[in-house]
Amino acid sequence: EVNMISTQVESLQKLDRQKRYNMILDKLKECIDGMTARELSEALGFKERNATAPRLTELEKQGRVKTNGTRYDEKTNRNVAVYALEVK
């Protein structure tokens, strides 16, 4: 029974991750200049940048998004990565 529950949890996490990937990719399609992790999180209705930052790193490793320069983030007073769709 424990194995079944952990398998169900793992399946849900994969679904949630894929859903988040799709949300991020769809939003990036709308923004030709790219977006920061914070901008994406806010545009998608999340309060924390960590709602998108880990997924952006994963999408970058998969070759689906790329870092496209930097932009000044007024909340952190530093330059942060701007992400855009990787065109193949």
Image: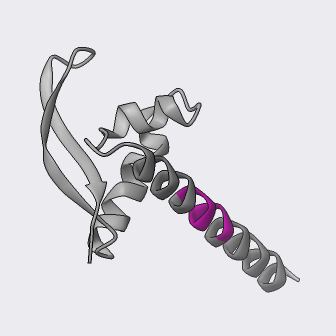
**Residue at the image point whose x is 37% and y is 47% from the top:** 53
Q: Nearer the viewer, residue 38 or 22?
A: 22
User: From the image, which quarter does the C terminus lie in?
Assistant: bottom left
| 52 relative position to 5: left or right | left
> In the rendering, at what x and y percent does residue 49 appear?
41, 35
Q: Is residue 71 above or below residue 1?
A: above
| 77 relative position to 34: left or right | left
Q: Is residue 30 magenta?
A: no
> In the rendering, at what x and y percent does residue 1 appear?
89, 83
| 74 relative position to 24: left or right | left
Magenta-tinted stretch: 15-20
Tell me how the rendering is colored: one colour
Q: Is residue 63 above or below residue 69?
A: below
**Residue at the image point whose x is 65% and y is 66% from the top:** 13
Answer with the quarter of the image where residue 16 lies. bottom right
Q: Nearer the viewer, residue 35 or 10?
A: 35
Q: Is residue 52 above or below residue 3?
A: above
Answer with the quarter of the image where residue 73 lies. top left
| 6 relative position to 29: left or right | right
Mostly what secondary structure, the magenta segment? helix
